[in-house]
Image (tube, grey):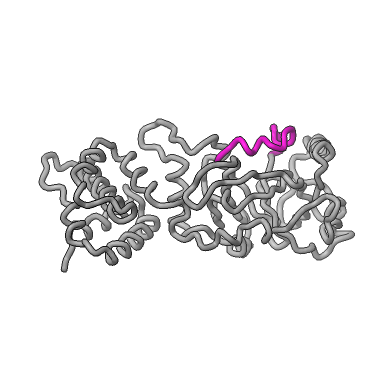
Amino acid sequence: MPYPEFDKTVAELVKPWFFGLQAGATYQNILTTKFNAAPNQQQIDAALSLGGYLGHSEANKQQRAALRAVLLVNFLMKSYPVQYRDRLKERCEKLDLAALKRAFASSFPVGFAGDNNRSVWDPIHLTSLHKHSLGQLACLTRPRVYKYCHPLPPFRFIIHGVGNHMGKVFDDPTILTQYEVLSMSLMSNLNVHAHDPQGVILRVHQNNILAASPTDVGVKNYAPGFKPDNLPNTLTITENLFDIAARTDGLKSPNYLLQNVRGYPYYNEVVVCGKAGVRLPHGVTRVMSVVGLYMSIGVDGVIRGAEDTRENRQKRVMAFAKKCNLPVLYIPRKDASPRF
């Protein structure tokens, strides 16, 4: 039996004005699977019909398409009773296009396209770092790493880079826990790329991982919360993360990110929620903590980054390490320019 309203609704999802080909196709697949399993397909299809209307402008067409999509996602993803369709329609048709898109996307959990990899982001699968029990990593505590440590011992860390002029991260070890959205990187002995020549090494619970991508995610770094900017037609942080999950087919594993060794920009980006106690669809975020510091060096042991700030940067890193009783690891990068 044909279901024209359903077909029309899901077809719009891949349009450039809506979610685009990649994200839209992921939404299409999920909703089609749900619809095929629904016992009341005919009733759902009929409920998506909005009837005739005046003013066939492109804006009106998009508004109606988004409204149908929100109705559909409520029926399929939230089990909203079809018999109360009129009540739902009356409430949703007051929303503008941007708000309808938010309502649609928020019906899916972050990482909806595939959250099966979350367990492998458990800190137990990354390298444990304790100042007084570094084991093989002890050779990384001296700048002349290649003299003592070649090849590099295996390690995997989530890091957050701090620029040449530092900022407040090296003054307060808890400052990153004020932000709900932080751009970080996954560093390993096989992929030592870091966005900045120095930074912090963190212990991050798997529930705090929002996205992982081998390409630039493009989130608003240091965002204090998921709330919208109250500007028309702007994406919220949450919408951005939904889009990332759709574009990357869900949360990628650490192994997937570390395979990206094709050359600059070496993206191994991990988007993290810094705050504890934030309720997300996959669970509640936990406390995130700084467990060490890193500095990128050349094969000669010289610290990377701007030469005129090098001495000051090293002093601040060492002072922070002493203050907080943290280890400092020197990570050699023979493949990067001295600037990084």
Q: Residue at the location (32% across, 65% down)? A: 33
Q: Is residue 49 left or right of residue 62?
A: left
Give, as a single range, the part of the protein colored magenta: 163-180
In percent of width and height, residue 214 lies at: 56, 57
Q: Residue at the location (47% across, 61% down)? A: 114
* Residue 300 visible in the shown view: no
Residue 11: which quarter of the image?
Answer: bottom left
Q: Residue at the location (28% across, 37% down)? A: 95
Q: Is residue 288 left or right of residue 44?
A: right
Which is nearer the eye, 155 or 300?
155
Up-down: is 252 above or below 109? Answer: below
In percent of width and height, residue 243 lies at: 43, 51
Residue 325: which quarter of the image?
Answer: top right
Confirm whether the magenta stretch covers residue 93: no
In percent of width and height, residue 296 lies at: 76, 49
Q: Residue furthest right?
A: 147
Pick the quarter of the image with the N terminus. bottom left
Which is nearer the eye, 15 or 334?
15
Up-down: is 245 above or below 235? Answer: below
Q: Residue at the location (16% across, 66% down)? A: 2
Query: Magenta region's main secondary structure?
Result: loop
Q: Is residue 186 left or right of residue 14?
A: right
Up-down: is 243 above or below 171? Answer: below
Residue 239: which quarter of the image?
Answer: top left
